[in-house]
Image: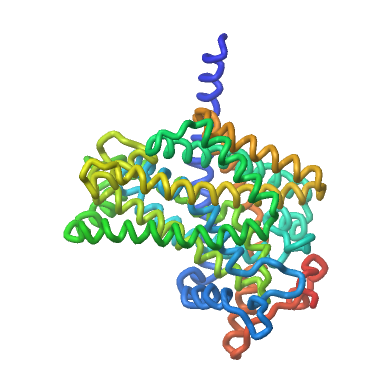
Amino acid sequence: MDATALSLKLQSSIGSVSGVLTDYVMVSVLLIAALFFTIVTRGVQFRMIGEMWRLLIHSGKRDNDTRKVDEPAHGTVSSFQAFAISIASRVGTGNLAGVATAIALGGPGAVFWMWVIALLGAASAFVESTLAQLFKVKGDRSFLGGPAYYIMKGLHKRWWAVTFAVLITLTFGFAFNTVQSNTISDALMTSFAIPREVTAWALAILTLVIIFGGIRRVSRFSEVVVPVMAVAYIVMALVIVCMNISRFPEIMRLIVTNAFGFDEAMGGTVGAAMIMGIKRGLFSNEAGEGSTPNAAATASVTHPVKQGLIQTLGVYTDTLFVCTATAFIILCSGVFNDGHDGIILTQKAIDAEFGGGHNIGSTLVSIAIFFFAFTSIVANYYYGETNIRFIRDSRLAVNIYRLAVAVTVYFGAIMSLDLVWGFADITMALMTLCNLAAILMLGKYAVILLKDYTAQKRLGHDPVYHSSTIPEIAEETECWND
């Protein structure tokens, strides 16, 4: 058997395993967990939206002593910066190429199911980020935490924690970063004829410059670039929607009817719409996946629920704003059933809207995807570093990992990723199932924290948490002893 045949056979095998894990097992468990947490938190993602925005705005202000609000002496990452890091990872290829793929394969109804998984999955995001804050530990320059830490400290299962740490490092540090760099090189090659090798070297060098600066450089880079690009992209989408405002009711009808299989002529079946919408929604907003808790844990706040609420808002920002912006661009253009897919479909849609044959869509999307995908590379790297330090806190191991990420980014920009995508889907599914099982077992603590937070708010206090509030885990929550 030659190398090509072996590669195709391996790709087919990985695709089969990936299909079962992601289309059936992961999607089912994800929905069950999201519904469960929505019920036990009494719809925290809906009833506390106002508090989420208040906390996010408040976290960016400074006191009279010029320290950022809620930032104790040890911490170096503000609540807003932690939010920006998580958004940097969420907002990337999935928002532009992933949404286009979902619509191309699942029909317009996939957009509806992306909204559903965002609205329900936000409860899972609240629980996992709150737990990350509760069980965080002190690192050299910032707090550290995430699923590996709350599995170890909350469930006392080191083998489970290490398994998750390995899976998230493989998924985000390598597989997803390869996807991001490949998308950047595709976009730049299409729009500006920049050779892939040039893009590969540039991305590898830029990645090394940023990641060797540590979490503070990551957070500062993310909090400047991501909001600006996200707002600019949403504004462009709003312009396109306004240009097609008379068609807005028709597009909403198309999304809803196709979601339930009432209009099969315009896309996939209801099953395809649901699966593609949920899969691409998860890839984009990461709710319940176990990635964003790594960023949430770094924040310096006075109560774990504060960062849990802020990270919940991140799910809405990603899916309800950025993903929806892409969906409306594509559906307004009318080119979603012309045989295009991925980032090319998004580019063609914008070209169709602005017209003139000047490839405006290709240029704008290339610029947007560069910033979105590159900030995702940086944030994805950090998730891997946090978990490498969990397995073994070794400077040598971290430096080797940094170099390996740069090498992965380089090769991702010049290679075909069919095999890598299949591998990434498998590790993503395993990582998500690993995390969901953990937060289902530990979710009771997030519910207790939420009740404590709301009780203090009713008394007019700025909520403060002490480890003595939940005495049975006081020894495992040493960051809250003061």
* Residue sitting at x 70%, y 78%: 465
Quadrant of the image containing the N terminus: top right
Q: Nearer the viewer, residue 312 or 216?
A: 216
Horizontal side of residue 374 vs 118, given as left or right: right
Which picture quadrant has residue 144?
bottom right
* Residue sitting at x 66%, y 49%: 211
Horizontal side of residue 381 vs 277, given as left or right: right
Q: Position of residue 166 (x, y in %)?
A: 70, 42
Q: Position of residue 54 (x, y in %)?
A: 51, 78
Q: Is residue 304 above or below residue 327?
A: below
* Residue sitting at x 63%, y 59%: 295
Q: Is residue 196 above or below residue 50?
A: above
* Residue sitting at x 41%, y 57%: 322
Image mark count: 0
Tell me how the rendering is colored: rainbow
Q: Nearer the viewer, residue 319 or 407?
A: 407
- Residue 271 visible in the current orientation: no
Q: Nearer the viewer, residue 188 or 286?
A: 188
Quadrant of the image containing the C terminus: bottom right
Which picture quadrant has residue 88?
bottom right
Q: Is residue 370 above or below residue 126?
A: above
Q: Residue furthest left?
A: 246
